[in-house]
Image (cartoon, helix red, strand yellow):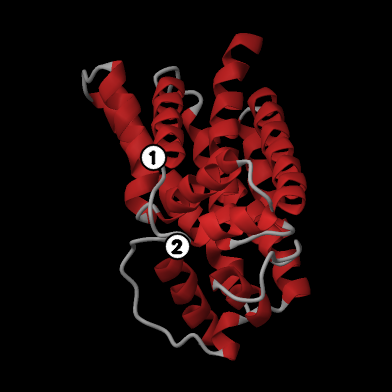
């Protein structure tokens, strides 16, 4: 029963999917991060279903399709990861010291660089989606589980930049070794499915995700001394954009 409560915590925290409320106690928090990829499964499933309907049963234009696909993850997550992305772009653009960057992450105000970063992100995301074909959709759908598996692995593995905050709550409450093992299984399963669907596309997509993961690790340690919830959200957005770009790039390598 506590696993169902852990599932409810993960879904309620990282999405707008309505689920029963669960107490954030030590027992329920132990395995909450194991279920983070479930949100990705819902996101990818919706994109596959809606994308299929739009491409096969409507005469909608490329721009409409691209914008619809770009908005689905935002509607599912409620924009929680984009908030972290915006805050991190603001902090990285400050070129201040580590303390200054951490202050910017905590600042509730949205800076100019955050707005510019979000505009650039959605323009790039929409442009990439405009190049997506029906053949690529199943692999892209899997990337949302893969990215959340990597993000969860970072939460239970990387050093935290501070001793408080939501990310630290998940770190302290998790059974780290078991959660890490489950998330690795999630990542391997998603990778295996992608390889089965299209090995050429999958290789490029997985490589793009791992490069984003390496960048995230090195950047977070150098610039912030560890990770925060905002940085985890930043990584998720960058990783998903990198994987989408990899999928589109694979079209020219067939």
Residue 127 or residue 207, whichever sits in front = 127
Task: Judge from the rendering whether residue 189 lies leftward or rightward of residue 18; answer left or right.
Answer: right
Q: Is residue 166 positioned above or below 14 on the image?
A: below
According to the image, label 2 marks what residue? 14
Residue located 28% across and 28% down the image? 54
Locate residue 139: give its quadrant: top right
Residue located 61% across and 25% down the image? 246
Residue 254 seen in this snapshot: no
Residue 86 or residue 171, whichever sits in front = 86
Outermost residue on the left side: it is: 59
- Report helix, strand or loop for mark 1: helix
Q: Is residue 170 positioned above or below 82 on the image?
A: below
* Nearer to us: label 1 or label 2: 2
Task: Judge from the rendering whether residue 49 lies leftward or rightward of residue 207; answer left or right.
Answer: left
Residue located 60% across and 47% down the image? 235
Place of residue 35 in the rendered image (x, y in percent of width and height, measured from the top left): 55, 66
Q: Which mark is residue 47?
A: 1
- Report helix, strand or loop for mark 2: helix
């Amino acid at each position: 029963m506590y696993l169902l409560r852990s599932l409810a915590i993960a879904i309620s925290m990282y999405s707008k999917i309505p689920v029963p409320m669960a107490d954030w106690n030590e027992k329920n928090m132990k395995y909450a991060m194991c279920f983070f990829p479930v949100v990705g499964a819902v996101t990818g499933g919706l994109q596959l279903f809606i994308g299929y309907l739009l491409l096969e049963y409507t005469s909608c234009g490329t721009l409409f399709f691209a914008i619809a696909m770009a908005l689905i993850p935002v509607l599912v997550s409620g924009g929680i990861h984009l908030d972290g992305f915006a805050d991190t772009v603001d902090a990285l653009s400050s070129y201040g010291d580590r303390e200054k960057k951490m202050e910017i992450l905590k600042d509730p105000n949205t800076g100019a660089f955050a707005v510019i970063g979000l505009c650039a992100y959605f323009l790039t995301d929409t442009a990439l989606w405009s190049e997506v074909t029906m053949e690529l959709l199943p692999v892209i759908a899997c990337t949302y589980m893969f990215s959340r598996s990597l993000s969860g692995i970072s939460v239970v593995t990387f050093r935290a930049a501070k001793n408080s905050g939501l990310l630290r709550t998940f770190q302290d409450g998790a059974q780290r070794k078991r959660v890490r093992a489950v998330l690795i299984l999630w990542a391997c399963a998603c990778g295996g499915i992608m390889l089965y669907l299209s090995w050429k596309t999958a290789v490029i997509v997985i490589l793009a995700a791992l490069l984003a993961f390496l960048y995230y690790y090195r950047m977070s340690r150098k610039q912030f001394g560890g990770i925060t919830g905002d940085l985890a959200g930043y990584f998720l957005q960058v990783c998903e954009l990198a994987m989408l770009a990899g999928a589109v790039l694979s079209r020219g390598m067939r």
